[in-house]
Image (cartoon, rainbow, N blue to C red):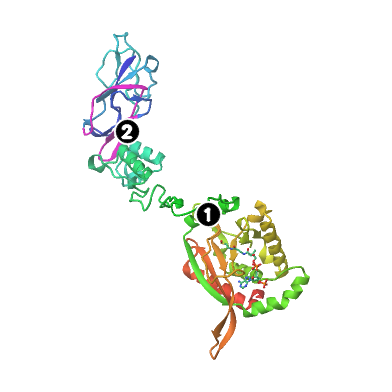
């Protein structure tokens, strides 16, 4: 064992600088390059790394002391094998070894007052690396080691309150923030949380049996999967839902007129296939709706294909098969596709390929009822349409009330991608196409 005396190394142009942090205490074990202390001048902050591995046996300085090159700052007890570190700076040759001295021996640097040495010694510490506070680009007052510590843990230093001199952020302050986030007393933004842990208020746990008989039934596989996906979309997408309605009197008359012919082709015509065609035409008019946000949220990935997901109600839960290339298909072909995928879905025979590649989803509750609803965007798509039940209603035509078939519908969209004005232009356009199907030919 040998004691190595650690002196302040060459610190460049600085004469006397303040010790702003002492990062070790007597008894601490340090490895080569571990930071021992932080110095700060009016221009820069610099850390003094350890030149050896060993145990700190003496600390000669405290926060606020002024030091310069050569100042004796601490002792480290190094094992014999580690007592002869390689010179950290070539231009500072190590002094020659002297005869072994009594235990414990001491190793000193050329800059310090010579003492008994056992082995060739290196400069007490490697050259300090000044770090310009301005170049860190941060207004927070913290040493490089604290910055590195915070960076490794993903902590934004601007959110940490410093308790050191002049409000300097210490390692302890970063630890305190992390602790309070983990305990739920603060959010990562440093604010008091609206709720617990992850920031989502927990639903209270209640023993319902205290109120009457209960039965616990495990959710089905599909419900578990779709539930997770719906929750993810709900939490990630800032939703806006635009409600609208359109006059589908002529469209439905056409559908009824074509019904018999369609049946001969083996398909059943419902309003949904016309809506799919109208939606695709509107997606071509408003390409932002036929897109997905890049994972970093910085760009929009616009799609040159038109695949429409259709929410299908099955005995096991909701699934969303995707009808591919809707722009290239006629009404009968789409009806056939729709019948096939909904049967497959209800029989539980969907493959992952059947459910992938969607651009936009339609959720139709029109065959069941309801007036309006707010569908959840099927992320990473950016919009979804909800169809409700069309009803005959009296509509004022300027002279009299006339019976018209009015279909309510809604479009929920990701407000990061679509503005309100664009949202309502889209719904208006879809409505116009459905009111006058001839426009789909234009
Ligand atoms: N207004 C009035 N009538 C409508 C209508 C509307 N918007 N949409 C469909 N109908 C009629 C159809 O014309 C049909 O009537 P007829 O038999 O007299 O022709 C009847 O309602 C039933 O239609 P359908 O539901 O069988 O067919 P579809 O093409 O409209 O829908 C499918 C197919 C698979 C989407 C549907 O069966 C389904 O599963 N819907 C539920 C989707 C769902 O659960 N969404 C919610 C998701 S969020 O939880």
Residue 71 or residue 324, whichever sits in front: 324
Q: Secondary structure at mark 1?
A: loop
Instruction: Name the residue carrying label 2.
Output: 47
Q: Which numbered disc flags the more N-terminal residue, 1 or 2?
A: 2
Relative to 61, residue 199 above or below: below
Q: CA distance from mark 1 to mark 2?
A: 40 Å
Task: Confirm if mark 2 falls within 8 A of ligand 1.
Answer: no
Check if residue 415 falls in the magenta segment.
Answer: no
Q: Residue drawn at (60%, 50%), measured in percent from left and top?
A: 221
* Residue 422 appears anywhere in the view: no
Left or right, 279 with respect to 47, comes to right
Left or right, 13 with respect to 332, comes to left
Where's residue 367, x and y in %? Answer: 62, 69
- Quadrant where the image shows the C terminus: bottom right
Q: Secondary structure at mark 2?
A: strand
Q: Quadrant of ligand 1?
A: bottom right
Check if residue 63 falls in the magenta segment.
Answer: yes
Instruction: Name the residue carrying label 1.
Output: 294
Q: Nearer the viewer, mark 1 or mark 2?
A: 1
Q: Residue furthest front?
A: 212
Q: Residue drawn at (77%, 69%), measured in percent from left and top?
A: 265
Where's residue 372, x and y in %? Answer: 52, 70
Specify the segment rendered in magenta. Answer: 35-64
């Amino acid at each position: 064992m040998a004691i190595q005396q650690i002196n302040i190394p060459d610190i460049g142009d600085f004469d006397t600088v303040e010790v702003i942090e002492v990062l070790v205490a007597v008894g601490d074990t340090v490895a080569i390059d571990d930071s021992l202390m932080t110095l700060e001048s009016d221009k820069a902050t610099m850390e003094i790394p350890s030149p050896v591995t060993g145990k700190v046996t003496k600390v000669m300085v405290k926060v606020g002391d002024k030091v310069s090159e050569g100042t004796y700052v601490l002792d480290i007890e190094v094992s014999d094998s580690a007592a002869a570190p390689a010179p950290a700076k070539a231009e500072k040759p190590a002094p020659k070894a002297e005869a072994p001295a009594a235990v414990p021996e001491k190793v000193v640097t050329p800059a310090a007052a010579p003492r008994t040495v056992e082995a060739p010694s290196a400069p007490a510490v490697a050259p300090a690396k000044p770090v310009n506070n301005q170049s860190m680009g941060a207004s927070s007052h913290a040493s490089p080691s604290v910055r590195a510590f915070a960076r490794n843990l993903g902590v934004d230093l601007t959110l940490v309150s410093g308790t050191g001199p002049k409000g300097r952020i210490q390692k302890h302050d970063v630890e305190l923030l992390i602790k309070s986030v983990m305990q739920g007393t603060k959010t990562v933004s440093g604010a008091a949380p609206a709720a617990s842990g992850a920031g989502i208020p927990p639903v209270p746990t209640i023993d319902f049996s205290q109120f009457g008989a209960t039965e616990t039934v495990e959710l089905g596989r599909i419900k578990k999967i779709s539930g997770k996906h719906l929750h993810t979309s709900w939490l990630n997408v800032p939703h806006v839902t635009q409600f609208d309605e359109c006059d589908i009197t002529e469209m439905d008359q056409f559908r009824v007129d074509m019904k018999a012919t369609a049946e001969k082709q083996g398909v059943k015509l419902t309003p949904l296939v016309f809506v799919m065609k109208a939606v695709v035409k509107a997606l071509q008019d408003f390409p932002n709706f036929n897109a997905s946000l890049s994972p970093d949220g910085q760009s929009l990935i616009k799609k040159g294909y038109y695949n429409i997901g259709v929410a299908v109600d099955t005995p096991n839960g909701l699934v969303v098969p995707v009808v591919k290339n809707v722009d290239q298909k006629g009404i009968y072909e789409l009806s056939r596709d729709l019948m096939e995928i909904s049967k497959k879905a209800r029989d539980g025979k969907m493959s992952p390929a059947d459910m992938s590649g969607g651009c936009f989803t339609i959720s139709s509750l029109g065959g069941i009822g309801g007036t309006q609803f707010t569908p959840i965007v099927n992320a990473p798509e950016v919009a979804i349409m909800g169809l409700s039940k069309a009803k005959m209603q009296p509509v004022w035509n300027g002279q009299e009330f006339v019976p018209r078939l009015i279909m309510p519908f809604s479009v929920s969209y990701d407000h990061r991608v679509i503005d309100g004005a664009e949202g309502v232009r889209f719904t208006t356009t879809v409505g116009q196409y459905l009111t006058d199907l001839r426009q789909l030919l234009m």
